[in-house]
Amino acid sequence: MRSEWLRKGHLLVSPALSAMGVVAGSTTRGLGSMGGSATPPEDGERARASLAARLGYPAVVRVKQMHGDTVLRADAPFPPPWPEADAIWTDRPGVLLGVVAADCVPILVADGAGRIGAAHAGWEGTTRRIAQRLIEAMAREGADPRAMTATLGPSIGPCCYAVGSERAAAIRERLGPDAERALVRRDSAVVFDLWTANADQLRAAGVGTIETAGTCTRCGDEEVFSRRGGDVGLLGLAFIGRST
């Protein structure tokens, strides 16, 4: 289902996950960059700490994102250096999970029984099925995908994500027949629809409810960071947490 995330100050919030009693959404540029090569580490750390305090959590739990398919359980902040992964989950209350992005798709998940998860899916993570891997990891620990709600946050849309022939070939090789719905010819270009690709993976994993914000970071909201819009090395943070 398409459901525009709601703006609350400098945050965008998922209606579907909020209805489940979890805090879930993403930051906008009004709260500063949450990481990235152009953000001094101390500034990113300060911005994340401020966000956690604003939301009532002790810290944001982060990993080193690698555009891969590794999923980790994250019950508390990792000591530096952060482990490499692109999806994290927990069943502990009081834990705020976070993934950074500036065009890649943030995927936030809750199962209604205390488990929450977050994933970061650029074109590489999408073709490595990181969304599906997250659901599988949670299911192995007792989660029922049919009871899950997943949301795809603001990210680059099919309106703005044209790919060259080499990348399109790599996408087809990795996704096989599943690539056909997500690779669409538009005028003289081929676009990669990350929203469709990730929603299809979540659906294939059995997720009961899938929400798509439908906001393109490149052309749909000037308050969100977009690498292709010129925000190189600046990142927003998608978050999900459960207090009790």
Image: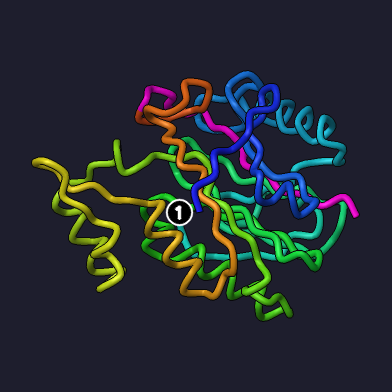
Q: Does the segment drawn in magenta span residue 14?
A: no
**Residue 9: x %, y % from top left:** 70, 22
User: Residue 7 falls in which quadrant of the image?
Assistant: top right
Number of marks in picture: 1
User: In the figure, 240 relative to 127: above or below?
Assistant: above
Q: How crowded is the residue under tag 1: few (<14 C-alpha within 10 Å), some, or many (20+)?
A: many
Quadrant that contains the C terminus: bottom right
153 left or right of 30 in image = left
**Residue 33: x %, y % from top left:** 59, 26
88 left or right of 90 in image = left
At a point 51% along the width and 25% down the height, the residue shown is 38
User: Residue 230 falls in which quadrant of the image?
Assistant: top left
- Find the residue positioned furthest to the left: 188
The segment highlighted magenta reads 229-244
User: In the figure, 185 relative to 53: above or below?
Assistant: below
Colour scheme of this structure image?
Answer: rainbow
- Find the residue positioned furthest to the right: 244
Which element carries disc 1, helix, strand or loop? loop
User: Residue 117 falls in which quadrant of the image?
Assistant: bottom right
- Residue topped by disc 1: 67
At a point 61% along the width and 37% down the height, the residue shown is 237
- Amino acid type shown at disc 1: His
**Which residue occupies the foreground of this view, 72 or 179?**
179
At a point 54% along the width and 32% down the height, the residue shown is 235
**Residue 80: x %, y % from top left:** 71, 47
At a point 75% along the width and 42% down the height, the residue shown is 60
Q: Does the segment drawn in magenta span residue 239?
A: yes
User: In the figure, 46 relative to 173: above or below?
Assistant: above
